[in-house]
Amino acid sequence: MTLIGKAVVAQGGGPTAVINQSLVGIIEEAKRHPEITRVYGAVRGVEGIVNEDLVDLTQETSRNLNDVAMTPSSALLSTRVRPDKAYCREIFKVLKAHEIRYFFYIGGNDSSDTVRIVNEYAEVEGYALRAIHVPKTIDNDLLGNDHTPGFGSAARFVMQAFSGINLDMKALGGIYVGIIMGRHAGFLTASASAARKFPGDGPHLIYLPERHFDMETFLADVKHVYDKLGRCVIAVSEGIVDAEGVPIVTKHMKSLELDAHGNVNISGNGALGNLLAESIKAKLKIKRVRADTFGYIQRCFLGNVSDVDQEEAREVGEKAVQFAVRQSKSGSVCIERIGNYAVQYTILPIQEVAGLTQTMPDIYINEQGNDVTPEFREYIMPLLGSDIPKTAVIRAPKVEKIIHKEK
Amino acid sequence: MTLIGKAVVAQGGGPTAVINQSLVGIIEEAKRHPEITRVYGAVRGVEGIVNEDLVDLTQETSRNLNDVAMTPSSALLSTRVRPDKAYCREIFKVLKAHEIRYFFYIGGNDSSDTVRIVNEYAEVEGYALRAIHVPKTIDNDLLGNDHTPGFGSAARFVMQAFSGINLDMKALGGIYVGIIMGRHAGFLTASASAARKFPGDGPHLIYLPERHFDMETFLADVKHVYDKLGRCVIAVSEGIVDAEGVPIVTKHMKSLELDAHGNVNISGNGALGNLLAESIKAKLKIKRVRADTFGYIQRCFLGNVSDVDQEEAREVGEKAVQFAVRQSKSGSVCIERIGNYAVQYTILPIQEVAGLTQTMPDIYINEQGNDVTPEFREYIMPLLGSDIPKTAVIRAPKVEKIIHKEK
């Protein structure tokens, strides 16, 4: 049954560099369907619905929408609120009052769970609503997706950062530890591997939340690389855990900070990097050890995006509207890889995606658990987009020594 | 007097994103002058000369040299060695043995001091040598220069990072502290200001090493912004000092690490960011406080450079050779701003640059010492290069409330 009414679109959770491509994809596609009488934007996710803090996106110019699409972070602002029954009641009051029949929510795991909750409430209430989750997350951990919008651009940032770091450490030597976002899934950390081009290039070691982290093994790995190369570049996921599953970083934090979804905050400080750097200095007696926490820079850096990611983020927005209007469906829009490289979009029942986490398949992680496999390289490369900047090394021949003649 | 002989080029200190433009500028220009019979590259700065670890750069292809020029970090690798008399003796043994009459050293303050030492040694020894310092430093703190190659690209990185951070914090609220490189000069930290476009855009506060940092004043500043906007984005230089001139970060470090030039290492850890974030949490009772230390990512991120910086870095290399051959001069190549925007290149006696530090003029810093002035904006904008990515906000009209009618 085709519903006639208004649509509301909102954005939830952490931002990405391309999340507004999806927003604009939804707006532009919705304008092509007379069933959707208006497109409202809710300011700060579901909070904007409850507070009736809505803007009429059908009164925006195409030029500005195109510029918004190129702008990182949620243009409609964001929230981490997780609706309960009482909250849903408030949501539906507003949906009914404004005759909203289409709900598009752009977000990650937690936001997909919000869509599930809203969808279930609509069914119980008997309120005809199409509730669609539009995927985004730099963590790349949404079930049912080959990869998620936002990931490719963040991965490209990590790759370009590690390309530079790699050359930096080659020039000056020592140990470098880069801490990358990713609570349960190591995809973004693993993307650092794409920075390797020439023999000896780093990152030389990669530690992921999918494998248990053991300090002794880590130090032995670092020593092995350093003894050989005089340097060691290491990519570490913020979410690495010990054999009991306890995040390494929380073992050393004075106080834990929980968000509305009950997640411990493990970003926004340098604790894990400092811990690893201090351990290397103390145990391996290496002087030049540097640790950087990539932090918030990596998730919506302006103007350095993957064009593939950009295009797909736009398309998931368009498809969300098409699934809702042409197929009268609710659910979660998913990206399926169907070629090398090509994708198609499907829609899954929201229960199959909501609140679930996809981690890196074993085939992408090496046996020792300290690097990725060639299969991961095949997976990641197309997602980074085109025009990847080149690097080159000097290949000039050595000059024959006169003073220090070789014997 | 025109000297005939070989040239040696080397790179010292921390790398930049465009340092190889200067290297390739020297090589390509040197090949146009028959007085320079060969161009050797010394591997790892002056270490490469002493160890006779030289490569013949006149046996490189133009294509590869162009790719090297686009590659961040010192292609000839780097060093922090500071030559003393005994070291100079070793240097000159090699220069004489290979009939090297031109010495080009690309680097910052410490490297300029190396050129001074080598130059003085040559004069005492009566060895005819043109010793030229070619400027580079992301810190932008070389005396005699309007700005230095490497700075514009690092500044552009900082600006783009803060553009994203600004939008990120706008979407989710809270406090963000970004720690930027810069021991004595705040230029790079101040560049974060270029990220501002719309009213309310951050960074809202900027703290520089040129002004004394006082924790109480800082917390009052943060509270003031946060109370007004519900967020506060702050750019802080790693080198901020208290009223006694003691770096804030060293007050809280367990052990100090000194380099060969006697500088305390203040990068490569998250100590300052953590200190500021913890102070804000404790004193202002604000929950969502994040601190990132930009660290090594900012100085040679691959492929995100200022084209102006790139071109000037190439030109200082070319000019170094022209000054040495056509004007038979030794000294330090400097960039002078002669228009809005245009530059010319001069050469200063090395003593006027070597080991000296330029900091931000008072005219660029506001009275409260927590922001920059419009004069700084005029200074920085041309250096960031062209095609700066746009940002946009949604300007759609509000929807009239039905449930929560305004009274």
Image: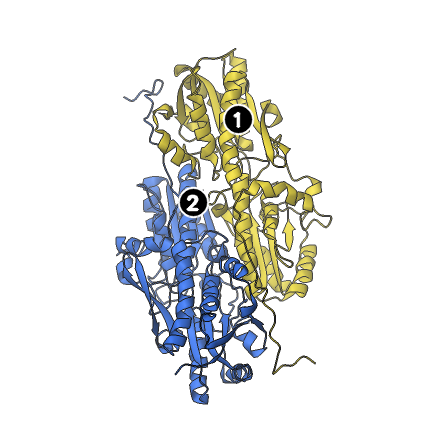
Chain colours: A blue, B yellow
Residue lying at 62% horizontally and 25% vertically, measured from the top left:
B352
Residue A292 in the image: above or below residue A6 = above
Secondary structure category for the residue under label 1: strand
Q: Is A351 situated left or right of B327 in this image? A: left
Residue A65 image point, x, y percent: 52, 61
Note whether A381 is above or below A197 in the view shown: below
The dot on residue A304 is none
Residue B199, horizontal then vertical, whole percent: 65, 58
Q: Quadrant of residue A343?
A: bottom left
Is residue B265 visible from the viewing direction of this image? Answer: no
Both labels 1 and 2 in a single chain: no
Tell me if residue A154 can be seen. yes
- Residue A392 is situated, as x and y percent measured from the top left of the image, at 36, 37
- Give whichever of B276, A353 is nearer the camera: A353
Q: Which of B355/A256 is in front?
A: B355
Chain holding disc 2? A
Task: Tell me where residue B333 appears, x and y as whole percent.
Answer: 56, 26
**Looking at the picture, which amino acid does disc 1 mark?**
His
As helix, strand or loop, the secondary structure at mark 2 comes to helix
| Residue sitting at the far right | B367
The three-letter amino acid code for the residue at tag 2 is: Ile
Query: Residue A177 versus residue B353: which sits nearer the camera?
Result: B353
Disc 1 is attached to a residue of which chain?
A: B
Q: What residue is pinned by disc 1?
A: B133
Using residue A145 as the reference point, say whether residue A87 is left or right of it: right
Question: Compared to A174, does A155 lie above or below?
Answer: below
Residue A207 falls in image quadrant:
bottom left
Pointer 1 with pointer 2, Cβ within 8 A: no
Residue A90 figure quarter: bottom right
Which numbered dot is residue A165?
Answer: 2
The residue located at (40%, 29%) in the rendering is: B43
